[in-house]
Image (cartoon, rainbow, N blue to C red):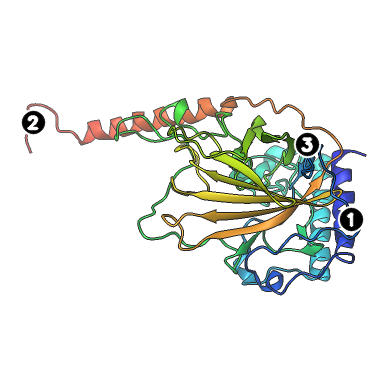
Amino acid sequence: MNQRNSLRALMLGAVMLGAITAPCVASAQTGGPATAPVVRQGYTVPRLSDGKPDLSGVWTNATSTNLERSANDGDKLALSKEEVEKIEKDTFARNDRQNAKTPKEIQDNWTKIANGPDTLDECRSGARGAACGYNAGWTDPGDWVMRVNGQGRTSLITYPKNGRIPPRITGAGARSRTVESSEESGSRGAADNPEERSLGERCIMSFGISSGPVMTDQLYNNTYQFVQTADNFVILVEMVHDARIVKMNAKHRTDGIHPWMGDAIGWWDGDTLVVETIGFHAGQNLRGGGPNTKVTERFTRVAPDRLHYAFDVQDRDTWAEPWGGEYEFASVDGNVYEYACHEGNHGLQGILMGGREDDKRAAEVAAKAKPSKGKTK
């Protein structure tokens, strides 16, 4: 069974999970802090020699459910069975359409297609034209609605109750995820130097910061391997080969160094692993968060093939209120293979050449506007 089919079987099993787990509390229907994870009836959590739960293995958080909820759904968090079935039916119908062989007529006449071939329905993200950076042949997003305790969800965020990241406070400003420029204030921005390109494009961090915290799924490579010892909990991320190292039963560092993915420490709360992360690198932040952002994550095994993940984000300097949520990882039969990231690729040359062309045109305009010597108005 390949990884995709394995995941499909696991997600189908999650549908049945709702019939054999305890019912969710009312807050799960209307939004609010994440509910306590429900362990599948009869499931015994595997343990290491020290008695701690064994969270190791390969997991995926691939899903069609977005981090933030659509405004059309308001405070609605739970989906009905019929709604889940329709969403997934539409998803698989789209996949079949996009994965079908391109008709010979289009192959023979692709240069004559109105508005160009990029307008065809090929992008799994739903985008078209220039916004579709990868067609369906290159992407592998989640096809299944995220379920928690067997319940289909409209979003991964559960609080605030509208399932959306809260408004930014006055003065928080807009912060970038890219490495901050060392150029003088006259810099033209991210097209001046390779060092100013995004972290993902430079193969420094995963695209969309899927490594977390908070860990979120992307268009592809949504697989993680958890490696656990008494002293460390390591999360190997498939996307751009990130490795989050959580120091167990330790204190946060005091040397002023801010590592990529932050300074993470962990401890056990019963059978739940709690990970607290602060001290984010200035060039990487959580969706525009500030230097005082704190993320708390909770990992709990709830079934042989499911692992509950809850997250809480606190930053009084950035957002009007805390936000967070929950979802469930599904286990994967297989390994995390190397992601050979190619820094810059072909796009970098084009971006920098475009930047220099902009410089040239700006200089020409400035030259025309400047009066010639010896002439007066």
Give SS at disc 3: helix
Badge 2 amino acid: Lys
Q: Examine the rendered structure and indicate whether residue 69 appears above or below residue 249.
A: below
Whole-angstrom CA distance, mark 1 to mark 2, is 82 Å
Labels 1 and 2: the sequence-earlier one:
1
**Left or right of residue 253: residue 233:** right
**Going 67% across and 51% down the picture, which residue do you hit?**
298
Q: Which residue is mark 3?
A: 108
Badge 1 amino acid: Gly
Whether the residues at callouts 3 and 2 have beta carbons within 8 Å, the answer is no
Q: Quadrant of residue 159?
A: bottom right
Where's residue 353, x and y in %? 46, 26
Badge 3 amino acid: Asp
Q: Quadrant of residue 84?
A: bottom right
User: Could you tell me how many numbered marks the image carries?
Assistant: 3
Labels 1 and 3: the sequence-earlier one:
1
Whole-angstrom CA distance, mark 3 to mark 2, is 61 Å
Q: Which residue is mark 2?
A: 375
Whether the residues at callouts 1 and 2 have beta carbons within 8 Å, the answer is no
Quarter holding the C terminus? Answer: top left
Q: Examine the rendered structure and indicate whether residue 343 appears above or below residue 226.
A: above
Whole-angstrom CA distance, mark 1 to mark 3, is 44 Å
Give SS at disc 2: loop
Labels 3 and 2: the sequence-earlier one:
3
Q: Which residue is mark 1?
A: 13
**Left or right of residue 114: residue 103:** right
